[in-house]
Every structure is written in structure tokens, then in C-alpha cells.
Amino acid sequence: MKYDIAIIGGGPAGYTAAEQAAKEGLSVVLYEKNALGGVCLNEGCIPTKTLLYSAKLYDSIKHASKYAVQAENPSFDLPKMIARKKKVVKKLTAGIRMKLTDCGVETVTGEAVIQGRTDDGTLAIACNDTAYQASHLLLCTGSEAIVPPIPGLSDTDFWTSREALKTKELPASLVIIGGGVIGMEFASFFNSLGAEVSVVEMTDKILGATDRELSGMLQAEYAKKGVKFYIGYKVTAVHGKEVTLEKDGEGLTLKGEKILLGTGRRPVVKGFGLETLGVELSRSGIQTNQYMQTSLPNVYACGDITGFSLLAHTASSEAETAVRHIAGKGGNGMSYKAIPGIVYTNPEIAGVGKTEEELQAAGIPCTVKKLPMAFSGRFAAENEGGNGLCKLIFSEDGTLVGAHILGNPASELIITAGIAIEKGMKAEELASFVFPHPTVGEIIKLTADN
């Protein structure tokens, strides 16, 4: 039972690495203790976007009169939404398993535990009472929801994203602790369906490192939709359906039929024998170099376990980088210069590269160009009364270093700017490309040429 590569974890990093390694002609064993696809496919990216699309359709129908279309008494069926979500997830997980099988990957369902490393560097792994050996090991164990030590929380029937994605009953009211990506996407979903939503965020803005101007615009948009925001408030206790807050020494109590934790995620570094290897850890996860190697040359780590960028597309790219290096095709290693970040609210918000705030804090001069999304004729035609902004940030020599978009479909537009950042394009070079008209995407050309 010896393989060229053993992979622990079958999420985006794990299954991508397994497929790529098999295509390189390497023998591969992949261990997954739950379901292929990891958090992304089973509890994160795909389930939430499936439900958010249903909510977006419902929103569109409710406001159809703005487009001279009459739709009386629209309604939704939450249990059927959940059933459809399950169908989509099942279809995609089956597709992953089929691809891995076709590539010749040995997939083992079970909890793998590292037994140690021999003198010649061979890795020993046990799973389901079977011993395995591998020349290389990829650690792709992902992340888990953070449950902060809030007094009373352990005695409360709270939700994480996992429970929220399974509910078949719409809560009348919902208090979301955390105004990051998870919190805001669920705020969007439940607000669209008619729940009374409150979002509590301890810092001075929602969406963490997202561009401040755009996140402020998104917050204002959702405030108009009825979401209540408590910015700068610390949660001091949770008792049943009550959440106690504090700001500047003053207390406040919120009530919600359900309480949802959106306080982020942390790498899984325990429970699979990592301590037997003695690899170097960083403050947030496992330390790696640009090829995703740990401090042990034949042990690699990809995805959320590094604690660097907890995004599925980052994980997949890191996995490809690691496999290329193992196969002797090292290249330039992993680049984090243009990793897009997206929040699938309605409207969407997306960013890539540097923000104004980040450059200002570092004392780096920059030039900012921005245009309202309505400068795109297609956007104006499809977003009656809609708001939005495209912001491009250039270095002193005119090179694009950041791009941030608020407005649908920001998630599909941001890659254009990401490619330009990765390739070091200047404003005139980006504006010289022929963008199709009318498209929302031409807002990038218009802004660069502004």
C-alpha cells in the first residue's frame, strides 16, 4: 500500500491535487472522513450560492413592476429550496468522485492519522485499520467554524452555517454575530425571505478587509432593506434567544428566534497526527514556502490549513502549485497578488489586489479611478434604480494594483481586473482592449479610461 502521494482531505485543495497528480502519472491515495468536496461543496460555497440564487429570484419577482412586469402574490417554499440545494450538492459530489475514479485515484472514506516519518522520509499513515505509505504527503484538512467563548453560548441552541443551511422553517427574527462574508451572505438570504435580521459586528465596519467605501455602500443598501446593523458592538453574553451587547460602556439586548454565528473559520491542525511530523507552524496555520512545501521537503500543505487565504479558489491553485513542484515542474510558485474575494449578496461585491486603506496604511502613493456602475448601459437597463461602483487603484507608475466592484454581476467581472493585476497592466493597456457593448463588464474599460 505505498503511493507516490497521500492526501488527507477531499475538499477543493485535496481533490484538485489528487486529480492533477494522477494526470501526472503519480499513484495517489486520497483520504476523506466526511464527504468529497469538503466544506466548500457541502457546507459553504455551493449550498449558500444555491439558496442565494433562489432568494435573488424571489427578490426579482417581488420588484418586477419596476420593469413593467406584473407578478402578484409571489411566494417561496423553503423546504423545496433546501431539497434543491441537496440535489445540486449531490450531483457535484458525484461528479468529483467520478473524475477521481476515472483518473485512477484511490479514494478512502475514513479518518486518516499520520503515524510518523521513517529515516528515508517515507510517510506512514493509518486509516480504517489499514497501513499506508507514501513518498509525499499533502495536508488539506481545511477549516472549522470558530465558536468564540461568549458566556452562555455553550448552553444556547445556536446556528453555524451548517445548521442554517439545513433549516426548513424560516425564523421570524435572526441575530447574526459577525458581519463578515458568512454573516452578510446569510443576512442577505434571510432578509430576502422576510425574516427580521440584525447583524452585530465588533469592528468598525462590515466585511473585514473589503474596500471601506464599497462595504459602506453595501451596508447602506441592506439597511434600506430592513437589516439592522450594530457596528462596533461586542457580544458580552448569550442567554436563550437574547444577545447582550456593549459599546462604549453602554449595554443593549437583542432578541432573535435564532442566533447565527458568522465569526469566521480557523484551520484544522489537530486530530490527524500532525504532531508526529514536527512541521513548522505559523500564527494562523502551517507554514509553507511558495511551492506549498512545509519545513519537511516531502510534506506539503494546501488550502485553509495554511490559514493564509481561506478561499476555495486559492486552495485549488495552491494544490496545482504543489503537484507541479512534486512532479518536477516547479515554475514560479504560488502568487497571491491577484486572489479575488467575493461576497454573494444582492448586489454582489468583489475585490482583487490592494485596497485604498491598505496602501494608505503602508504609506504607498496611489491613484484611484472610479465610476458609478450606471455608466454601463447594460447595468442601467437591468438595474432600475440600482446603485453600484467600480473602483480601480493604480500605483505611481500607472500599474493596476487593485480593483473593487459593487453591483451585479461583480463576481463574474472581477477576474478581468485580476488578470490585469497579475500581468502588471497599466491603465492605457487595460483600456486598449475591445470590450463588447453593451455589457456590464465594459465598466472596467470606462473606469480605466476615465
Image (tube, rainbow, N blue to C red):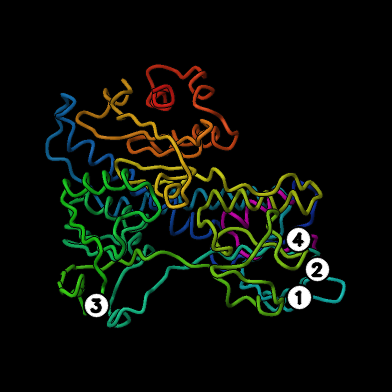
Of marks 1 and 3, which one's residue comes earlier in the chain? 1
Q: Dot 4 corresponds to which residue?
A: 5
**Residue depicted at 55% across the width and 34% down the height:** 419
Work out how far the residue at label 1 is from the one at label 3, CA to CA, in angstroms.
46 Å
Q: Dot 1 corresponds to which residue?
A: 131
Work out how far the residue at label 1 is from the one at label 4, CA to CA, in angstroms.
14 Å
Mark 2 surroundings within 10 Å by alpha-carbon count, few (fewer than 14), some (14 through 19), many (20 or more): few
Work out how far the residue at label 3 is from the one at label 4, CA to CA, in angstroms.
46 Å
Work out how far the residue at label 2 is from the one at label 3, CA to CA, in angstroms.
50 Å
Q: Dot 2 corresponds to which residue?
A: 1
Residue stretch in magenta: 2-21
Observer-nearest of 278 and 4 = 278
Label 1 amino acid? Ala
Which mark lies nearer to you, 1 or 3? 3
Is 94 covered by the magenta stretch? no
Give the side of residue 353 with respect to residue 450, left or right.
right
Of marks 2 and 3, which one's residue comes earlier in the chain? 2
Observer-nearest of 179 and 186 = 179
